[in-house]
Image (cartoon, rainbow, N blue to C red):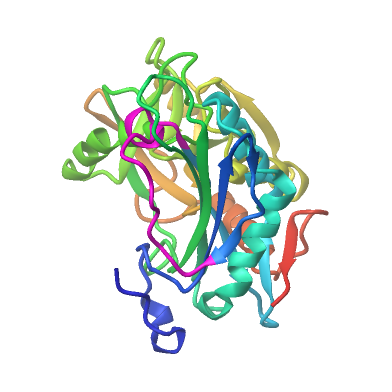
Amino acid sequence: MAKAKPATEIDWENLGFDYMDLPYRFLAHYQNGKWDDGELTEDGTLHISEGSTGLHYGQADFEGLKAYRTKDGSINLFRPDQNAKRMTRSCARLLMPAFPEDKFVAAVKKVVAANADYVPPYGTGGTLYLRPLMIGVGGTIGVHPADEYIFTIFAMPVGAYYKGGLKPTNFTTSYYDRAAPHGTGQSKVGGNYGGSLLPGDQAHKAGYSDVIYLDPATHTKIEEAGSANFFGITADNEFVTPKSDSILPSITKYSLLYLAENRLGLTAIEGDVFIDDLDRFKEAGAMGTAAVIAPIGGIEYKDQLHVFYSETEVAPITKKLYNELTGIQFGDVEAPEGWIQKVEV
């Protein structure tokens, strides 16, 4: 696998969301009941047994977060402690030994510092995307937890999610379920995403940006929007997002719930969002690490397209929320206490 080109040769204005083999990543091993200290390595290939549970039984989880170049040239991390906590919960669901949360954050900072030249310049809209990953490894063929694990963090520069600016797109509902009742929907595990590939592909071929998943028990309530969380804004200025044990607890979602209430004066609500009651919302969107906010123009359900604010223009409150959150991440807006951690280079 070829190494990424030198940072001085990268076209920062035209980055996609693609894997790059950067110079350094973090790698730690769990053996004999404990984690080693881990270290930075230049080897981007994982060497694992063919009997690894991560390959056969889906004993694997991951995270996603970003590093941001600020106007003064320093580097911000946005709430990495929350990614560490969420990965701990995902590990518990799969009977995997969590990597210590303080060491998780320290390892993230090491990877960013080691690859600092690849953090895109301020103003390009690009960021350094980080992918912490844990998998069960070793020679385990029975259906039970592995005795050995690998924890790694790799990184790559990615471009602004929206080429040409923030724009609404349309979503469609699906026959398929994202997660089962009482399943792994609340955990960031690989199996949740493997099952989404087919419905996502069908949505794209039909001209939609992604799938709105309904609750698996009754198919009457919105749960997630593709691989992101859904939100709607009512005429009474309520910021509403679904509440369910099957939904991944998005760090972006909980950040926007706080900002909607404390910065924009909205009423923040987690509750049921019924698919046949979309008229209550004047704006809608999806929220997650990659896109921050993806405005939803309309949702197709039973061959009818329900349009919210507009299919072509970003709604005003959605735009304010996007600007507030990205302003915090890039250091242009004051952050709530503890939300930003600096990377020392």
Q: What segment carries the magenta color? A: 41-60
Judging depth in this view, the residue of 276 and 86 nearest the camera is 86
| Quadrant into which the N terminus falls | bottom left
The single residue placed furthest to the top in the displayed view is 218
Residue 80 visible within the image? no
Above or below: residue 247 compared with residue 61 = above
**Image location (x, y in percent) of residue 37:** 67, 54
Judging depth in this view, the residue of 24 and 292 nearest the camera is 24
Q: Looking at the image, which residue is at 62% across and 43% down?
A: 251
**Image location (x, y in percent) of residue 190:** 40, 37
**Image location (x, y in percent) of residue 233:** 56, 37
- Please tell me whether the stretch drawn in magenta is mainly helix, strand or loop: loop
Is residue 22 located in the magenta-colored stretch of the structure? no
The single residue placed furthest to the right in the displayed view is 337
Q: Looking at the image, which residue is at 38% across and 72% down?
A: 15
Q: Is residue 282 left or right of residue 276?
A: right
